[in-house]
Amino acid sequence: MLGRIVDTKTSDQIQLHGFFVTPATSSNRIWIIVHGVNGNFYSSTLLMQLAQTAIEAGNAALLINTRGHDLASFGSTETPARLGSMYEIIEDAMLDLRAWIGWCQREGFEQIGLMAHSLGAVKCAFALAHQDLRDEWKAVDRFLALSPPRLNTELLLRDPAKCEVFRQHLNEAQAFCREGKDNHVMRVRFPLPNWVSARTFADKYGSGDKYDYLTWVPKISARTLWMFGEHEVRLGSANFLDADLLLSERLPAGHLVGVIENADHSYRATREALRIAIVEWIGQ
């Protein structure tokens, strides 16, 4: 794809970069495409294919970084900030998304959709459910959520295979935070093998149901499609198991849930089936 590198700055002065692609003919709709944990706007073949799908549908696409991009990075503010997935706080992504929505509006786009994968989908869903309807968020009318995990402390503590590992990690993270060592980096094995600071682990996984979309999904007014891979919702860990069925019970009319047969979390062998489903939804 041919496009250009763009940037924006959040209200707390974090500079973020993205990649902007336009279709052959002009369009008043743009899709903001959001990466998952440890990700960025340029390295995911899945996100690139989402952008290509948007372009083929005649819409513009903007692949973005949030402040949680890559494992670790540093902000360009006057006071250097620890950023990246190792240090991110999910709620802060609202500032990132708002900045990018504002960028799209300044470029003249009147209709804005969000496409997001994994933790990126959690960030977008949280932001849409807790937005201020008086500001830029009014322009966001569509949301594609690909494989968002349920971030629910009690749910993870009941995982039949890894509950004790999770309990140990959570206790360690909370202990470091009590000692004032918020930025102490831990190597964790569940719910995602990763390197993460104590503060980030405690926020992401130890905040009860704050980031569990099932608790606030009815507040999202944008039309949504929630998509999962069959393997993760039928064979996965507690934070994915039967998420599609539980969502279907809670979503208001006009919101859709789908499962791609034989797909894993990254849809590696099922990209064409995913593309077809997204194109159909975009065209509705």
Image (tube, rainbow, N blue to C red):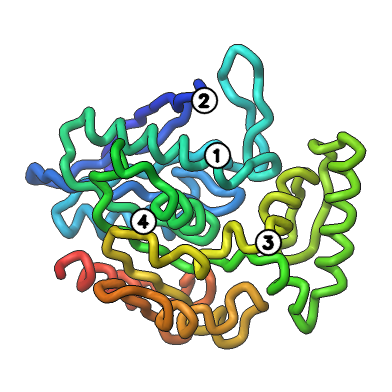
For badge 1, the amino acid type reads Asp
The answer to whether residue 272 of the structure is visible from this angle is no
The answer to whether residue 229 of the structure is visible from this angle is yes
Q: Residue at x 41, y 40 (%)?
A: 97
Q: Which mark is first along the chain, 2 or 3?
A: 2
Indicate the secondary structure of the residue bearing disc 1: helix
Give the distance between the C-alpha atoms of the residues marked 3 and 2, in whole angstroms: 28 Å
- Asked if marks 1 and 3 touch (Cβ < 8 Å), the reply is no
Q: Which residue is mark 3?
A: 208
Which mark is in front, 1 or 4? 1
Indicate the secondary structure of the residue bearing disc 2: loop
Q: Which residue is mark 1?
A: 92
Q: Position of residue 228 (x, y in %)?
A: 46, 75
Which mark is in front, 1 or 2? 1
For badge 3, the amino acid type reads Gly
Q: Which mark is first along the chain, 4 or 1?
A: 1
Which mark is in front, 3 or 4? 3
Which mark is in front, 1 or 3? 3
- Looking at the image, is 156 positioned above or below residue 205? below
Q: Which residue is mark 2?
A: 14
Q: Which residue is mark 4?
A: 115
Q: Position of residue 171 (x, y in %)?
A: 88, 57
Instruction: Bin the neighbour count of mark 3 within 10 Å (Cα to Cα): few under 14, some 14-19, many 20 and up.
Output: some
Q: Which mark is first along the chain, 4 or 3?
A: 4
Is 135 or 146 nearer to us in this picture?
135
